[in-house]
Amino acid sequence: MANDYWQGTKMRLQIVRYEFRNDTLIKPLVIRDDIHANQNHTGCRLVFGPDKKLYITTGDADEAILAQDLKALNGKILRFNDDGTIPPDNPFFNNDTARKEIWTYGHRNPQGLVFEPGTNTLFDSEHGPTGGDEINIVKKGMNYGWPIIHHQLAKEGMVTPLAEFTPSIGPSEAMFYKGDKFSQLKGKLLVACMRGEGILVLPLNSDKIVSQEILFKKTFGRIRSLITGPDGYIYMSTTNVDPAEGKPRPGDDMILRLRPSGSSNLMLTSQKIDANMVAQTSPVKMTTSMLIQQMCASCHGNDLKGTDKGANLITATLKHGSDKQSIINTITNGVLDKGMPAWNGAISKVDIDKIASYIIAKRKAAKR
């Protein structure tokens, strides 16, 4: 179980193992404590692998550079024994400059983690910065690039995603269906989508995604979690009251059980959408206000006057230049040593120009 808690003024994440007996959780054992957390970008998906090891996803806690820091546990997939000890075959176990718990790194906010039955291939689903959501094959010791690369960018020594989704689908829990109630879903990768409001179904051919469909598109709202029950039916939970994207509706939130057509009980029908890969669709046109909220506000604040994560962009001296072209260059190329990703390739040059113009206008207004 993953628990968020506060330590002074800072949020922390801990992983705790319990025994479940007589409808009660007993004998708590802390697997790992004091992982840096945040209201956004904390992960955290827990799954046991076929090797009996516990795999844990962590987000970058809205501090992107931590994903590349091998001394930090953020932006990683971690691997433990079930008693909290660290397996000696972890890739950095004998590396004195890295945390021994790390299995892979360079992740932004992975919220889905699942092993494919039969092949034991590990897949994750994770949130991109603005679009750029990902499905990855997770391999021991590999670097998945955030914040240095994202979307379809490539760099030697870093892994580009198996599939990339722009506009964002907000992928959460992933699973392979292995029950006997839905023959058409057997062996397919299913991903719960929050912003996409549906279940993404991905048939695979080895390590390739061959097609895509969406079930329950815009029917139940944001879907957080899904799982196959011991009865072979699919259970899913909605998450429609989350700030700030949630839009509560009567009866929220729900846990739903999906039954196939032909069942004697009431069936929840699906809406099948014929579509190409989402990565090939046109991105949503965003207003300048939307761009600022999505690209800048989490680090620099809603008013861009700075937070403990990012500089004041309105009144402070900008280290990389305060004229428009310098600001455009900074947005385009990023400041990677400070954890600011390069937005070139994630948003258009027109949108980068809009952000720079907005910052310039705000700086001029502040001097009046």
Image (cartoon, rainbow, N blue to C red):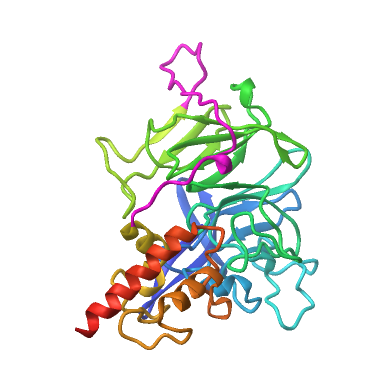
Image location of residue 88, percent across then percent down: 79, 69
Q: In this view, does 120 lie above or below 102?
A: above
Compared to residue 45, the image places residue 193 above or below, namely: above
Residue toward you, 78 or 24 = 78
Please indicate whether residue 249 sits to the left or right of residue 53 in the image. left
Q: Nearer the viewer, residue 161 or 324?
A: 324
| Picture layout, residue 181 above or below residue 345 | above
Which stretch is magenta? 258-287
Tell me, yes or no, whether the highlighted magenta stretch contains residue 151. no
The image shows residue 10 at horizontal and vertical percentages of 40, 77
Query: Residue shown at 36%/68% (left/top)?
Result: 297
One can see residue 109 in this view = yes
Residue 267 highlighted magenta (yes or no): yes
Q: How many marks?
A: 0
Q: Is residue 264 rendered to the left or right of residue 207?
A: left
Q: Magenta residues: mostly which secondary structure?
A: loop
Q: Is residue 188 above or below residue 296?
A: above
Quadrant of the frame with the C terminus: bottom left
